[in-house]
Image (tube, helix red, strand yellow):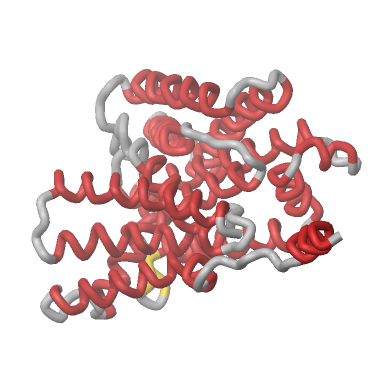
Amino acid sequence: MAQTDTLTVQAAAPEKKPVLPWIWQSSTIIALVALVVVFTTIGGGVFLTPGNVTNILYQVAILAIIAIAQTIVMVVGDFDLSVGTTATLAGATAGALMIGGTPIPTAILIALAVGAAIGAVNGILVAYFSLSPFIVTLAMMTTCMGLTLIVTDGSTLYGWPEVFGVIGQARVNGLPFPVVYAIAIAILVWLVLRFTTIGRKWYAIGGNAEVARLSGVAVRPTRMLAFVSAGVLSALAGVILVSRLGSAGSGGADNLMMYAVAAVFLGMTLLRSGRANVGGSLIGVAIIGVVQNGLNIIGVNTYIQQVLIGVIIIAAVLLSSLKSRTT
């Protein structure tokens, strides 16, 4: 009897909560604040000036859009390695069309259609054929690289109408247009995820696809829509990048996929559920932007910066994993 009572008491005992759970909940924000303090201290008063802050925002605006695209796919529980090369291909497509005489609005729409098509192919193969999103999007990443080389003929494109540069180079009240686009897109996607039916379905599928299916969610087309949305946003980022740079090459946004993944994983520590979310992804983007800008200011070698970014990616995945084990 005594043994039974002991087992009963043990069963009824409350589950232990992790020590200082708020650290997990706020670890990404704490890291961002700490980095700002460090670079402000050792940066000779340059880092936290309004001009440099605007410069950081300008530098990470394209990355923010691609990170938001990656966020949508990861909300559904999938992964997209092709977001960077999709942006590169879409930007090159728009540039080539404009050089050939296509009107700017038409060229942009075709570039966005390219992004949608890439996302649709990814989504169909993952959702309808049950292929691994890692393998599918890795193959698509390689495909987009090859298509970009075909579109550009392996060279750098330039020479479209100067007015196209307004999209990526103009400013409103001192704020660069790409930053405005990134903010607008972030708000729009947050609203979709937070308040719309499709957003709730995406989160439901990411939580448990089978339960979502039994609840009446059309899982396959909904997953595909996530990939299509990511493709369109990536293409838009590519168009803005080409406008900002004034040229289109074969590798414009390819490396941004890695940074986008790091940003999303960093942001996943902000929610108790450890899910991808727009706000967290933007904080992750800010961390990457602060690190790159701060290291440039203090004169750290570019190669060492690449190593440190790799460390950040590992730390992001580790934090996300530890967060899921302690909640």
If the image is split into quadrants, where does the N terminus sit? bottom right
Percent position of residue 148, x then y = 38, 25
Q: Does residue 269 appear in the picture of this structure? A: yes
Foreground of the two, 48 or 321: 321
Foreground of the two, 113 or 124: 124
Residue under the image location 54 percent in, 70 percent down: 21
If the image is split into quadrants, where does the C terminus sit? bottom right
Q: Is residue 323 left or right of residue 301?
A: right
Residue under the image location 69 percent in, 57 percent down: 193
Q: Image quadrant of residue 158? A: top left
Residue under the image location 38 percent in, 24 percent down: 145
Percent position of residue 152, x then y = 33, 25
Foreground of the two, 147 or 205: 205
Q: Is residue 9 left or right of residue 101?
A: right
Whether residue 176 is situated above or below residue 138 in the rendered picture:
below
Percent position of residue 22, x then y = 52, 73
Q: Is residue 308 left or right of residue 219?
A: left
Count of numbered labels shown in the rendering: 0
Which residue lies most toward the front here? Answer: 1
Q: Image quadrant of residue 195? A: bottom right
Q: Image quadrant of residue 174? A: bottom left
Whether residue 188 is situated above or below residue 165 in the rendered picture:
below
Residue under the image location 54 percent in, 64 percent down: 270
Percent position of residue 259, x then y = 37, 47
Q: Does residue 264 appear in the picture of this structure? A: no
